[in-house]
Amino acid sequence: MDIQKAWKIVLGQLQMEMPRASFDTWVRDTKALEFSHGALTIGVRNAYARDWLESRLTSTVSRLLIGVMNQSVQVEFVVSESEASQDDDVEDELDKKEIAVSSEEIASLYYQVVRPDRAVYLPGYFRKHLSQLGPDLGWMYVGFRQAAYSEGGRGGQKTARLSGKQIATLCGISERTFWNRVEREKTWEKLSGLVTSKTTEPEWAEGAQPRRLPRKYTVAITLPLTGSDSFSLAQWLQSGVETFNGPAGVLAASCETPLSELFAPQQENSSPGKPMDVAEIVRYLFSGELPASQLEAFAERLRMHLMPQNDQIVISLFFLEHILPHLGAGPAWMYILLRDRCYEGQDEQRDICTVQGGYAEIAHWLGISRPMTIYEWMNGRFGKKAKEPGKLRHPVTLAYLKNLDEGRAENFNHSPRTFRVLLNDIPPEIVQAALECEEEAYADCSIVFTRFAYDLYAICSMGFTRFADDLYATCRVFKPLNSLKNPLTPLKTSPLIPPQEKKKYRHKEKTGVGSMSYWDLNHLLAINVASPQKRNTLRRAGATGETFAAWLLYAYTPAGAGLHDASGVSNAIARTLESPRGGPGWPANALAKLSPYKLKAMLEKDLEGKAVDDEIYLAAFSSLEDQAKEELLKRLFGE
């Protein structure tokens, strides 16, 4: 296969597996330079990129290339001569007085995981929009805005193409929930002025295979004023023309007038105007009376007065990708807004915040009519008829917020409430525990805060579990996952644990039925002695027997030879839970698509010393020892 085509396929796989920011920064511009003697040379921009790729992606790329090129491939990252020569030319032109600045290796685990440089910056004025949008649509705007900026605006382009799944991730919701909201007319009524749908009817591309064209949306990167503020500002400017001697005078005065005078107090359920940008209001009122350049200058000055540069809501992309889905839309906004208020105090106790209006004021921030909802985010529990009665409904909230005035308020809704607020995206004790922990084990967690930065390796994880006595949720599991990047070792046969005697249930489980015509997940879990908890978790996740079988097969292929778990069972369970309908790729996926009967016949034929005429089988198991093949038979089909 042509190396350029092969590398293009690998880039496509990496783009799906890696965070977009990391892929765009380090991987997108790489090029395949040469393939010789089983080694592929990849050209990168500079030495810094080379070191980053070597330390993080070497094994991943090698694994992907095995599936693409049907052979083991070593990977070498080098600085491309063309890129290096361009850099040299630029350096020659630099003034000799300039200095070279390089960054040291990041020493903080928190900075390595969270990467605070990857963040969303919203004008503080967005708080007014949030009270009208509500928490769910507030995150919808954040998702659209960041998608448009990162893919288009940052690169100087006005248009970006993204999948619904990509935007849904930034909104902290599932793709299905995203499309459900997109189909509602009320969504676009509330987002009017912020995000506008340009596609009223489905559009289709003509051709032999018709396909639906992408839906089109316009996103306001420059934040407009709310409808009520637009109306108030326009009224103030119109009424002040005579007082301040004309358009120029009233515009200059508006830039010095307190916001409380420019904006009338907002009435509930009242929005007499429509959201408009400051420049749009100025042009609408005074176009033709002042030069266009002067109008633009006044509009920019007035916008800076209304939305000061340093009044920002800062949200890390790490928070959007990993914490928002578990906190939920409402608690997440409450946490973000309370955290921002912590920095308004003058003393050093930054993690304490008092809200004078209590739950009612917080509910007003978020556009919620029921203050009791705020209380329930921190104290609500499931009822007696629920699957887990007594369990907190929003356990993750307690890791980020603690109410210090519980039980002492005179008025439940309006009395002041003081909160202790976590100022970091990850609790410090978790980072400390991750650094101190020396155990090499999978952490069975409900929340995992990092994607796999290395091949099958997570930097740290965070779990919430319950105390047995009062069912409170708290941080209990803090373990770094085992690297699994061990040297290739001879495959050792682990002793098979005899199946436990089955309990008699009223409804007998049909384990093994059809297991020779299709991959039966119940059958595979039974013969590999998976715990009942793991079985239930896999079933609830919608896992398939084919995916589980593919990961079992992967452990016996050359690409999986370095697994710490030689049997592949623990790895198969963990990977199947991550992607219930995915798989490790070729050749394991291709083998799992065969019927169990056909694959078993191949293994038995091979063990009898007969030739197996199947390219996929030979690519996977040609170098596998007979002892390992016998073990694989037991893993897939039992005794």
Image (spheres, rainbow, N blue to C red):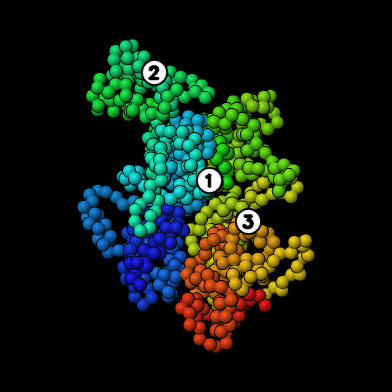
* Occupied quadrant, residue 225: top left
Instruction: Name the residue: 44% across, 70% down.
Output: 67
**Amino acid type, mark 1:** Thr
Q: Is residue 519 visible?
A: yes
In the drawing, does residue 388 fall left or right of residue 295?
Answer: right
Judged from this view, the residue extending furthest toward the bottom is 609
Q: Secondary structure at mark 2?
A: helix
Question: Which residue corresponds to mark 1?
Answer: 177
Q: Is residue 90 left or right of residue 417?
A: left
Find residue 29 and report its horizontal and vertical position in percent. 34, 58
* Residue 355 seen in the figure: no
What x and y, as percent, mark residue 573?
Answer: 60, 63
Mark 2, mark 3: which one is toward the viewer? Answer: 3
Q: Residue at x 55, y 84 (%)?
A: 606
The secondary structure type at the circle numbered 1 is helix
Q: Identify the residue at image location x=74%, y=64%.
A: 508
| Residue mark closest to the camera, 2 vs 1 | 1
Label 3 element class? helix
Residue at position x 66%, y 61% from top? 535
What quarter of the picture does the N terminus occupy? bottom left
Dot label at residue 540? 3
Mark sitting on residue 235: 2
Q: Furthest-left residue in view?
A: 93
